[in-house]
Image (cartoon, helix red, strand yellow):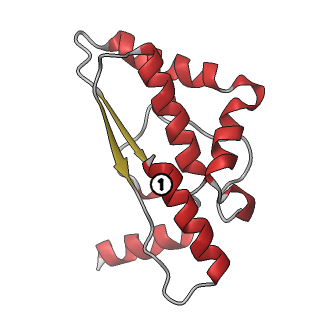
Amino acid sequence: AALEASAEKLEAEAQSWTDFQKACLHPKSTYLLQGLWQGVDNFAGFGEGTEHIRVEDRREDLRDRVRFWAEECDTLRGFQLSADDLGGFGGLAAAAVEELRDEYASTPIAIFSLRPPVPQGGAKLDARVRLLNDALATS
């Protein structure tokens, strides 16, 4: 009963995906985007993500965050990257992989795709955008 009450309370009060985590994240282990990106339609394309990281040279902030953790390692064995790659976040992930390749050329990178379920009976335009994002994400 207490677990169910806690789950209902969390569901009612949760504001973002981090509210569902039990572990606390270090501030440098996440990369927050400037602006609100939840439910925003104009961040649905792969190109919006690549453009977002290039504007105002946000790559330097990304490099600093990776460098912080890389310097903490005695032996850096690789990177794990999790991203929703079918929209603007796919563009951000591609830019992150590009930065990792430039800075740590011989270090392996494992990329995990976090994709939402495919909606059934959606609009043709949504299906085309989804296919285009899929093609860009896998290239």
The x and y percentages for residue 94 are 51, 38
Q: Residue at x 45, y 68 (%)?
A: 116
Q: Residue at x 58, y 44 (%)?
A: 91
Residue 36 showing in the rendered view: yes
Residue 26 falls in image quadrant: top left
**Are there few (<14), some (14-19), or many (20+) residues within 10 Å of tag 1?**
some
Residue underneath mark 1: 84
The x and y percentages for residue 120 are 48, 87
The x and y percentages for residue 24 are 40, 41
The quarter of the rendered structure image containing the N terminus is: bottom left
User: Which residue is at the front of the view, 90 or 136?
Assistant: 136
The x and y percentages for residue 47 are 66, 47
Residue 38 falls in image quadrant: bottom right
Note whether 106 is above or below 29 in the view shown: above
The residue type indicated by label 1 comes to: Asp
How many numbered circles does the render carry? Answer: 1
Q: Secondary structure at mark 1?
A: loop
Note whether 20 is above or below 51 in the view shown: below
User: Which residue is at the front of the view, 117 or 3?
Assistant: 117
User: Which residue is at the front of the view, 10 or 133?
Assistant: 133
Q: Residue at x 53, y 66 (%)?
A: 131
The residue sitting at the bottom extreme is 121
Relative placement, left or right, of 95 versus 51 is: left
Relative placement, left or right, of 105 versus 103 is: left
Note whether 91 is above or below 72 in the view shown: below
Q: Residue at x 28, y 26 (%)?
A: 108
Residue 14 showing in the rendered view: no
Note whether 130 is above or below 63 in the view shown: below
Relative placement, left or right, of 97 versus 15 is: left
